[in-house]
Amino acid sequence: MKNNIKIVYKTAIIITICLAFVIPGVAFTEKNLYKQTLVFADATFEWIPVNASSLHTIIGNEIILHETGQIVTLEIYVSGWSPKLLKTVQATVNSSKYSNGVGGTLIPYGWPGTPENGCFIDTSRTDFVFNGMVFIDAVYHSALDYMWGATLLMGGKSDGGFSYYLGTLVLEIPTTANGSYIIDFIDGTSNTFMKDDGDNQILPIITTPAVITINHAPNKPATPSGTTNGKVGKTYTYTTNCIDPDGDFVEFWFDWGDGHNSSWVGPFASGAPGSASYIWTTQGTYNIKVKARDSKGIESIWSDSLSVTIPRNKVLFNTQHIILFMLLVRFQNMFPILHLLFRQ
């Protein structure tokens, strides 16, 4: 019995000693594997459109403005690396494409007192830790390149997964703006970079730009053309056309003037004729009109209307005709009898 107890005791000591060496080794290995895995992850700086002051649509990293003269808000996010392994990150904004050669120049907005020269960092975000301008300039004015610098993410709060918020850029879109503008970063290890906890730069870095696109509504469509006098139950076709300022394809919605539901027809190339057909089932006068919708979903105003008259179908015999006809038939049947009476 004593021997068995000694064997169990010795075995427990051996297992304890082994675990003392194995567990730290496993932990160290896991930590290194975790870090090595993150080294080969895609380290990404990304622009995310988040809002505009008027009618707009956001699709991925593109914000489509359906009206000019807006204020657009963009945010920078970094992903692909754990903030626990970061020392610093820095993102320098490339403003060279704020002017696209087509129309208008985007203007940074929101830096107190100098909206034409700067941008701001939104320090109201609880997950954004900024060391201040003493550490490195928050805004770098040379050549309108705006810099978010020395952002320490230690203790930062995750925005979801490995995506973390860095800063905000607000841009004023002038009424003269046209076409597309690219909001990007300046590449290069001295401009846009991450540094790990050993102060080593993390490479490669992927930068994802945002695109601001100005989309104009289609012009007022032409008045529908076609028959203005028709018949109940007969099919009639009407045609219109519309120019889209951006050259987008357009669809047409015809309002047939009788309250019945319609549907979009098309798409048709900008300026090309588009047609639709309809059958009126009751007599009346109908004012038909049409509106256009571009490929980005923005609608035009209504066209001028075309008046179409659908009269009642002509009837060959009305009630009076039928009565007269029946009398004539009866009179014709009595004609032989009357003929005999008069002969006598």
Image: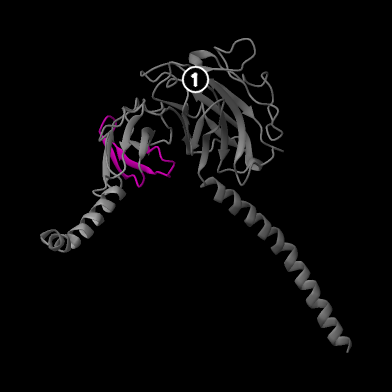
Q: Is residue 306 left or right of residue 65?
A: left
**Residue 324 higher or lower than 108, as above or below:** below
Is residue 30 covered in magenta? Answer: no
Residue shown at 76%/72% (left/top)? 15
**Going by the picture, which residue comes out furthest to the right?**
2
Position of residue 168 relative to residue 34, above or below, is: above
How packed mark 1 is, by other alpha carbons closer than 10 Å (few <14, some 14-19, many 20 or more), is many
What kind of element bears circle 1?
A: loop
Point out residue 9 in the picture as x, y percentages from the top left corner: 84, 78
Q: Quadrant of the N terminus?
A: bottom right
Image quadrant occupied by the C terminus: bottom left
Residue tagged 1: 173
Question: Which residue occupies the foreground of this view, 339 or 51?
Answer: 339
- Which span is picked out in magenta? 255-282
Q: Is residue 165 left or right of residue 4?
A: left
Taking the view exactly as shown, the residue that stands out farthest to the left is 343
Residue shown at 19%/62% (left/top)?
333
- x, y percent for residue 249: 32, 35
Look at label 1 and name its amino acid.
Answer: Ile
Near-viewer residue (124 or 303): 303
Q: Nearer the viewer, residue 196 or 218?
A: 218
Q: 245 left or right of 110?
A: left
Q: Kindly identify the residue that appears in the image at 66 percent across and 32 percent down.
A: 152
Residue 46 locus on image (x, y percent): 52, 35
Farthest bottom residue in view: 1
Place of residue 219 in the rendered image (x, y in percent of width and height, measured from the top left): 36, 25
